[in-house]
Amino acid sequence: MVVRWLGFFLLVIGRILEIVASTGVAALSAMIVGSSGLVNTNLASAVFRYSTTLNREAFAVLEHPFLNFDRLQGAIWQVWLMPAAIWVVPIAGIAIIGELFGLQRWAFYSIGTAAALCSVPGLVGFIPPPPGDVVLLFIGVACTGAIAGLVYWLITGRQAGLIVRSLKQ
């Protein structure tokens, strides 16, 4: 009995690490595809500006580097981790939903991540000036999300629900 629970515990820990690593690789692939020109370059600066408005104190510390190093280090983490989280959280949300419900189809991860990443421009309040660019922006973000979802599915999404299935046995 103890061996069975130890095996289950190791399965859970391994699966969590696999999901976190796969989410990171999917986010990296989204960043590579997005920076290749598919996504409007002004969106990245809008995400950065949005993250600095959440904590103006962190941005002020960056402007005065002779202050306390601990505050400067915290400000750097705040300013660079917040934009990363804005892009990673939709990917991680789709990964968690897929894992909890045991969804193993590539279409779920691809379409779900595309739809989730399409919420980012609305979250940061970014709208490109000409009306035609809005459609191109969402097409670019959706394609980036679809590729990130497909990468996640290729790495670990095909075994989604492994923990739940092993609990039922």
Image (spheres, grey):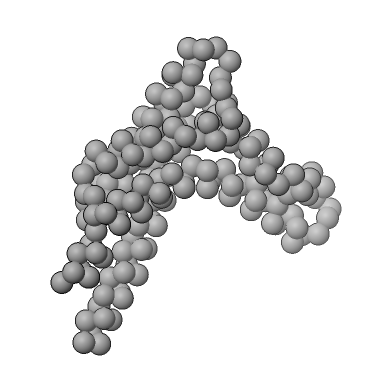
Q: Is residue 104 left or right of residue 142?
A: left
Image coordinates for residue 19, horizontal then vertical, percent: 35, 57
Q: Position of residue 134 (x, y in %)?
A: 48, 19
Is 2 placed above or below 106 here? below
Whether residue 26 can be seen here = yes
Query: Dividing the image into 4 quarters, which one contains the C terminus?
Result: bottom left
Q: Which is more toward the observer, 116 or 81?
A: 116
Q: As rendered, which of 26 and 115 lies closer to the eye? A: 115
Counting the numbered discs, the total is 0
What is the residue that sits farthest to the bottom in this orientation?
Answer: 2
Quadrant into which the N terminus falls? bottom left
Quadrant position of residue 116 = top left
Point 58% across, 15% down: residue: 129
- Give the residue displayed 44% in from the left and 19% down from the top: 136
Q: Position of residue 66 (x, y in %)?
A: 84, 53
**Residue 48 sits in quarter:** top right
Q: From this viewpoint, which residue is outermost toward the left?
A: 169
Residue drawn at the location 74% of the way across and 44% of the way down: 56
Describe residue 157's horizontal placement relative to residue 33 as left or right: left
Residue at image point 57% right, 43% down: 83
Q: Estimate the x, y position of residue 123 in percent, counting from the top left.
A: 54, 35
Q: Is residue 25 visible?
A: no
**Above or below for 69 versus 91:** below
